[in-house]
Amino acid sequence: VRLATMPLPNSYLFCKALQGGDELDESQLSQWDSDPPYQEPEPADTIEEVQFTKNLLDIMFGYCM
């Protein structure tokens, strides 16, 4: 219930993903359909990584709506 009451992001990426997913590259999403462990390196704890994660969440929430 708490997730449903959270405000939606209003970033540029969220809005673009909400308009349509035609420009999103989904070529590597199928790797997440299988069970863990995933063959991905540990993310770096950098400012860039935090921004990338935020952008990814905005896109995924916008695309799923």
Image: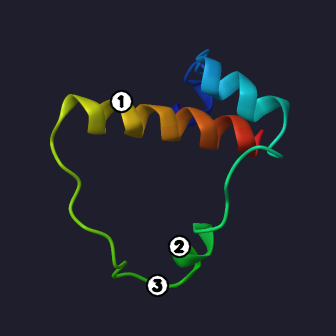
Q: Amino acid at mark 3?
A: Asp
Vertical position of residue 34 compared to residue 49: above or below:
below
Foreground residue among 20 and 4: 20
Q: Where residue 4 appears, x then y in whole percent? A: 62, 33
> Which residue is disc 2 drawn over?
32
* Coordinates of residue 10 in the picture (x, y in percent): 62, 15
Q: Position of residue 61 (x, y in %)?
A: 64, 38
Determine the CA span between mark 3 and mark 2.
Answer: 7 Å
Q: Residues within 10 Å of mark 2 (few under 14, many from 20)?
A: few
* Position of residue 6 in the picture relative to residue 47 (left or right): right
- Determine whether, in the image, residue 63 is placed left or right of residue 56: right
Q: Where residue 43 sits: x, y (%)?
A: 23, 54
Q: Which residue is mark 1?
A: 51
- What colour scheme has been applied to the protein in the rendered image? rainbow
Identify the residue at image location x=49%, y=33%: 55
The residue mark sitting in front, 2 or 1, is 1
Disc assigned to residue 35: 3
